[in-house]
Image (cartoon, rainbow, N blue to C red):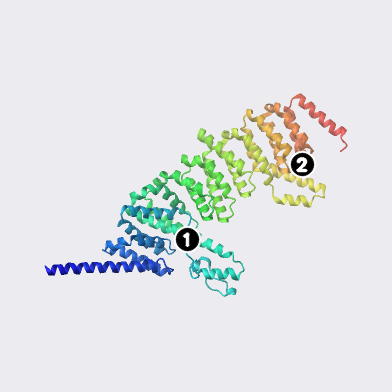
C-alpha cells in the first residue's frame, strides 16, 4: 500500500513538473520570441515549437490554461511575412481549434474572418530598431549616400532627414501598412484553409463572406498573393464551378463594391476578377443583367491614376465588348433587344462623350460592332446613336491636320485644298458607315426626332469634320427616306441656311450646297419657293 501511494505521489509530482515545464516554455515562446521584436528565423522556430507542443504534448491541462496566449501568438505569427511561419502557424491553429471548446472555436473563426475581410491592421508599437521592410522590399541606399539597407524605422527616418523631406517617413509607413494588410490576409487565408478540414460545418455560415474575398484575391497583381490565394481556394473550394455558381451574386456584389477602392491593388484585382467572370460566364443571366453597370464601372476605371489599373480595365472592357456584341445579336430576339436597350445608353452617354481617348475609342468600336450584328434591334436607338457619333467625330481627325491648317492659314489656295482633303477623310470615316447602317434601319416614325436633333446640331456643331458628317447624314436620310422626309425638309433647310451654308470653310459650304440639292427634290413647293427667294436675295442683293 505504501509502495502504491509512493508511486501515485511520484506520478503526481512528475505530472506537476511537466505542466510547469510546459508552461515555462510557452511563456518564453509567446512573450520573448513571438510578441517581441524577433528575427525571421526566431519566428519560424517559435511556430514550430508551438506546433510541436500542441501536437505531441499530452498535458492538455497546461495547454488549456495558456490557450488564449497561444491563440494570440499564432494570430501574430499568421501575419508574419515569412510563408513557412504562416503555414506552420496555420497548422498549429487547426490543432488548437480541435482541442478547444465551442466558445473558443467561435472566437478563433471570428478572428480569422476579421483578418481576411478587414482592410486595416492592428496598431503596433514602433521603435527605432523595429523592422519595417525586408531588404528586398525597397532596395538599398545609393552608393552616393553611403549604401546600406532601408529596413528599420531608424534607417528610414535617417533617409527622410538626409533628403530634407521629413514627410517621406509617412509615405514609407503607409507602404508598410499596405504590405502588412496583404501579409495578414495571406496568413488568415492559410488559417481558414487548414480549418476547413476540421471545421467545415462551423465555417459554412461565413462562406458567403469568405468565398467572394478569396476569389478576388486570386487575381491580385502580386504573384505571391495570387499563388497563396489560389492554393487556399483549391482547399476551401473542392468544386469551383458549382461554388462560383452558388455564390455568384455575392462575388459580383463584392467586386462592384470594391472596384473603386482606395487601394490600387484592390481596384486592379476587382477588374481582373470581373474580366474572368464575364469571359467564363458570358451567357449567364446574372452576368448579362449586370453588363450595363459593369460598363459604367470599367469606363471610369480606365481613367484611373495607376497605369496598371488602367491597363487591366482596358483588357476587361475588351472582354465586356465581345460579350455585349454577342448578347445584342439580332438572333437573340427579345433578349437581344433588352440587352441593347440597357448597354447602348451607357456607351453613348458615358463612353463616346468621355474626354479620355481610350474610353471614347472602346465605346465607338463597340457601338460599331453592335451595328454590324444587331440589325433591326438598332432601330429604336438611331435617334441617340447618330447625334452621338456626329459629336464624337470631332476627335477622330488626326492632329496633324490641325497643325498643317495653322501653317497654311495665310495661303487661300492651299487652305482650300487641305479643307477638301479633311472633308474626304471625314467621309471615309467608319463612323459614316455606322450612321449609314443606322439610317437604313430607321423607322419613319423616328424621322421627326432625328431631324429635330440634326437641326439642333447644325446650329451648334463646331469644326469641319462634325459638319461634313452632319451634312452626309442629312443626305443619307433624303436618299433612303425620300418622300417620307417631305414634312421635315423645311426645318432642316432652315437650320442649314442659318449656319452651315454660311460657314467659313469652302469645303463645308460646297458640301452643304450638295446636300440642299438632294433635299430640294423632296421638299414642299412652299419650301422650294422660300429657298429660291433666299438664294435670290443672297446673290442679287448682298454685296459680299
First along the sequence among labels 1 and 2: 1
At a point 72% along the width and 51% down the height, the residue shown is: 400
For the N terminus, the image quarter is bottom left
Residue that numbered label 1 is attached to = 123
Examine the rendering and report whether any part of residue 368 can be seen: no
In the rendering, at what x and y percent does residue 77 appear? 40, 63
At a point 84% along the width and 33% down the height, the residue shown is: 538
Q: Is residue 309 left or right of residue 539?
A: left
Residue that numbered label 2 is attached to = 507
Judge whether 199 appears above or below 326 on screen.
Answer: below
Bin the neighbour count of mark 2 within 10 Å (Cα to Cα): few under 14, some 14-19, many 20 and up. many
Q: In which quarter of the image is residue 14?
A: bottom left
For the C terminus, the image quarter is top right
In the rendering, at what x and y percent does residue 352 appear? 62, 43
In the rendering, at what x and y percent does residue 93 appear? 35, 59
Q: Quadrant of residue 72?
A: bottom left
Examine the rendering and report whether any part of residue 242 can be seen: yes
Q: Nearer the viewer, residue 220 or 403?
A: 220
In the rendering, at what x and y percent does residue 389 appear? 65, 40
Amino acid at each position: 500500500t505504501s509502495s502504491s501511494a509512493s508511486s501515485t505521489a511520484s506520478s503526481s509530482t512528475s505530472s506537476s513538473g511537466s505542466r510547469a515545464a510546459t508552461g515555462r516554455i510557452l511563456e518564453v515562446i509567446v512573450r520573448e520570441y513571438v510578441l517581441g521584436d524577433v528575427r525571421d528565423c526566431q519566428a519560424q522556430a517559435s511556430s514550430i515549437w508551438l506546433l510541436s507542443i500542441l501536437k505531441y504534448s499530452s498535458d492538455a491541462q497546461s495547454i488549456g490554461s495558456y490557450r488564449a496566449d497561444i491563440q494570440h501568438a499564432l494570430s501574430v505569427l499568421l501575419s508574419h511575412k515569412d510563408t513557412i511561419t504562416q503555414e506552420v502557424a496555420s497548422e498549429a491553429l487547426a490543432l488548437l481549434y480541435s482541442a478547444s471548446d465551442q466558445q473558443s472555436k467561435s472566437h478563433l473563426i471570428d478572428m480569422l474572418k476579421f483578418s481576411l475581410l478587414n482592410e486595416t491592421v492592428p496598431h503596433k508599437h514602433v521603435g527605432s530598431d523595429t523592422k519595417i521592410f525586408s531588404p528586398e522590399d525597397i532596395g538599398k541606399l545609393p552608393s552616393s549616400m553611403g549604401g546600406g539597407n532601408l529596413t528599420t524605422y531608424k534607417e528610414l527616418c535617417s533617409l527622410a532627414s538626409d533628403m530634407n523631406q521629413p514627410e517621406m517617413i509617412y509615405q514609407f509607413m503607409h507602404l508598410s501598412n499596405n504590405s502588412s494588410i496583404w501579409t495578414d490576409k495571406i496568413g488568415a487565408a492559410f488559417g481558414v484553409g487548414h480549418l476547413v478540414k476540421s471545421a467545415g460545418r462551423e465555417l459554412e455560415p461565413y462562406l458567403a463572406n469568405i468565398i467572394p474575398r478569396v476569389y478576388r484575391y486570386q487575381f491580385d497583381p502580386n504573384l505571391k498573393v495570387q499563388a497563396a490565394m489560389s492554393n487556399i481556394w483549391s482547399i476551401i473550394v473542392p468544386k469551383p464551378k458549382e461554388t462560383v455558381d452558388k455564390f455568384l451574386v455575392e462575388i459580383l456584389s463584392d467586386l462592384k463594391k470594391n472596384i473603386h477602392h482606395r487601394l490600387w491593388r484592390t481596384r486592379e484585382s476587382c477588374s481582373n476578377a470581373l474580366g474572368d467572370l464575364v469571359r467564363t460566364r458570358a451567357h449567364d443571366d446574372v452576368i448579362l443583367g449586370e453588363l450595363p453597370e459593369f460598363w459604367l464601372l470599367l469606363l471610369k476605371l480606365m481613367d484611373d491614376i495607376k497605369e496598371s489599373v488602367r491597363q487591366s480595365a482596358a483588357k476587361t472592357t475588351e472582354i465586356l465588348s465581345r460579350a455585349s456584341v454577342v448578347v445584342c445579336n439580332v438572333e437573340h430576339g427579345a433578349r437581344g433587344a433588352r440587352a441593347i436597350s440597357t448597354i447602348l445608353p451607357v456607351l453613348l452617354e458615358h463612353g463616346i462623350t468621355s474626354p479620355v481617348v481610350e474610353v471614347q475609342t472602346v465605346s465607338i468600336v463597340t457601338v460599331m460592332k453592335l451595328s454590324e450584328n444587331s440589325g433591326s434591334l438598332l432601330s429604336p436607338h438611331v435617334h441617340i446613336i447618330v447625334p452621338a457619333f456626329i459629336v464624337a467625330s470631332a476627335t477622330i481627325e488626326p492632329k496633324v491636320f490641325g497643325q498643317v491648317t495653322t501653317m497654311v492659314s495665310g495661303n487661300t489656295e492651299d487652305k482650300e485644298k487641305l479643307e477638301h482633303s479633311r472633308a474626304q477623310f471625314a467621309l471615309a470615316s467608319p463612323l459614316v458607315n455606322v450612321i449609314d447602317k443606322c439610317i437604313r434601319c430607321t423607322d419613319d416614325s423616328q424621322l421627326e426626332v432625328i431631324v429635330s436633333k440634326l437641326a439642333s446640331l447644325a446650329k451648334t456643331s463646331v469644326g469641319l469634320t462634325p459638319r461634313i458628317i452632319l451634312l452626309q447624314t442629312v443626305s443619307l436620310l433624303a436618299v433612303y427616306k425620300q418622300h417620307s422626309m417631305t414634312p421635315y425638309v423645311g426645318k432642316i433647310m432652315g437650320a442649314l441656311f442659318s449656319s452651315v451654308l454660311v460657314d467659313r470653310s469652302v469645303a463645308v459650304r460646297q458640301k452643304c450646297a450638295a446636300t440642299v440639292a438632294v433635299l430640294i427634290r423632296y421638299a414642299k413647293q412652299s419650301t422650294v419657293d422660300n429657298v429660291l427667294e433666299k438664294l435670290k436675295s443672297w446673290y442679287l442683293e448682298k454685296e459680299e
